Amino acid sequence: MDLILGSFANANVPDFSEDELALYDKLLQNPDPDLYNWISGREDVPKEEHSAVMDQLLEHHYAQCRATGSDDIPGRSK
């Protein structure tokens, strides 16, 4: 999770508005296993956790997976 969230934070947090920072902080309050399952597509993101920041995080992870040829692409069966 540190690699996923760290690269996302480096790429996005400096440009976040106060509202986006609050959404990101709220997202980080979730347990790592839940975050990983949502980001990897193993579980659907709960309605209450879905936000524009979560969408950005999912897209960031998907782009990283494509760039590295990883099998950990959301929505892709293993």
Image (cartoon, rainbow, N blue to C red):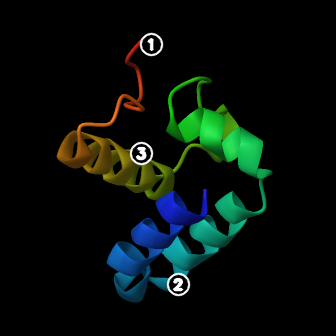
In primary-sequence order, the first of circles 3 and 1 is 3
The C terminus: image quadrant: top left
Kindly identify which residue carries mark 3: 58
**Residue 71, located in which quarter of the rendered image?**
top left
- Mark 2–mark 3 Cα distance, whole angstroms, equals 20 Å
Residue mark closest to the camera, 1 vs 2 = 1
- Measuring from the top left, give residue 72's x and y in whole percent: 42, 32
**Mark 1 and mark 2 residues within 8 Å of each other at the beta carbon:** no
Res. 78 mark = 1
**Residue ID at (52%, 84%):** 18
- The amino acid type found where label 2 is placed reads Glu
The N terminus: image quadrant: bottom right
- Measuring from the top left, give residue 47's x and y in whole percent: 64, 34
| Secondary element at tag 2 | helix
Kindly identify which residue carries mark 2: 18
Q: Quick one: label 2, few (<14), some, or many (20+) residues within 10 Å?
A: few
Q: Which residue ends up furthest to the bottom in the rendered image? A: 14
**Residue 50, located in which quarter of the rendered image?**
top right
Q: Is residue 3 left or right of residue 23?
A: left
